Amino acid sequence: MNTESKVGIFVIACLAILGITLYYVGNEQWGRRLTPYRTYLRYAGGIGPGSEVLFGGIAVGRVNAVRAWEKDPTRIEILLDVKDGTPLNDKSVAGLGAVSLMASPVISITTGAHDARRLRPGDAIASQETVSIDDMTRKLSGIADNAADLMTQVRSELKNIAGQAQIVLTNLNEATGPANRKQIAEILQRVNALVTQQSPKLDQITDQVLLAARDADSTLKTIGPLVNHADQAVGNVNATIDQLREPIRQELGQLNATIEQAKSLIEAVHAQVRANDPTIREALENLRVATENLDQLSDQVKQRPWSLVRIRQPKDRKVPR
């Protein structure tokens, strides 16, 4: 073999070794380390082949295919290729997501639970629907309509409340009107008159209390020398109490009976007063009407004194021409 043949064989062997190496490396990188899964959504939201797959916010794979599901046309079948070793489990949930507002949509998978069963290659990942922009628009429109109805209802309620408030203010003005103020002023005048009438009696009672206090002071001074003979006095008092104990008990029993009779009498008086309360009120009302009639009669007599003598009013004199 010449040199050229040896070089050709060497080049072919190198190319074969390179091809085998690339095959095994590619198979290791893109075949053995990627695990297929699938999930189903009713709204894909722009997901397509090559879209990123996130697991707990970490990029773990890509979307392989997006197509309508043959068994249920209302759902979209999404095929995923995820890195081998990604701990997908029964509690993991797939849904539409986005890293930012301007980024392309991605498939976001939750981490699930630690004790949940791990998914096998080819298993379906549980999914959760995401509110689409159209659904959000419809909900916002419904909220706007409800808000308009609510505002209309609130306006009507405010009108009713304003009307009721006006009624309350009117009643308050009537309650604090001139007639009620006049009655309150009359009551205060009567109270002032009563205080003025009772002031001398109160002064007299105060003077009597002061005199009693002075007498008590003088009595205490007089009793002072008798304190030295307290033992003898106490003995005499004990003897006297022993003699008077039984009569005092009898007197106390009679006093108790008298108090009970007085209580019953007072209750009867109260009952009689309550029973005659309407009659008393009617008599007071008649007295008030009679007083008003007398006032009117007095005014009429002052204005027309001739009415006490004449029955008819004299005719007006004619003005001379």
Image: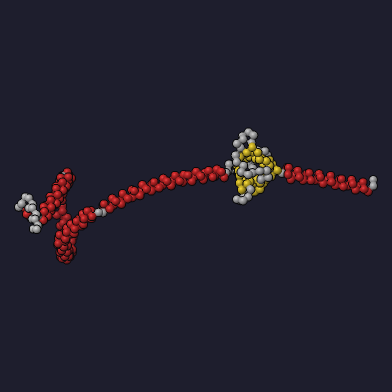
Residue 145 visible in rendering: yes
**Residue 32 in the image, given as x and y percentages of width and height:** 73, 42
Q: Which residue lies furthest to the right in this view?
A: 2
Count of picture labels? 0
* Image: 297 above or below 87: below
**Residue 204 in the image, given as x and y percentages of width and height:** 14, 62
User: What residue is drawn where x is 51% and y is 44%?
Assistant: 141
- Quick one: 124 or 260, which is closer to the camera? 124
- Quick one: 69 or 33, which is closer to the camera? 69
User: What residue is drawn where x is 89% and y is 45%?
Assistant: 9
* Image: 182 above or below 119: below
**Residue 97 in the image, given as x and y percentages of width and height:** 61, 46
Q: In this view, does 125 lie to the left or right of 215?
A: right
The quadrant the C terminus occupies is bottom left
Q: In this view, does 131 lie to the left or right of 273?
A: right
* Image: 90 above or below 296: above
- Quick one: 233 or 276, which is closer to the camera? 276
Q: Which residue lies furthest to the top in this view?
A: 71
User: What residue is drawn where x is 14% and y is 51%?
Assistant: 292
User: What residue is drawn where x is 25% and y is 54%?
Assistant: 177
The quadrant the N terminus occupies is top right
- Quick one: 313 or 289, which is closer to the camera? 313
Residue 111 visible in rendering: no
Q: In this view, does 290 lie to the left or right of 152?
A: left
Image quadrant assignment for residue 306? bottom left
**Residue 147 in the image, given as x and y percentages of width and height:** 46, 46
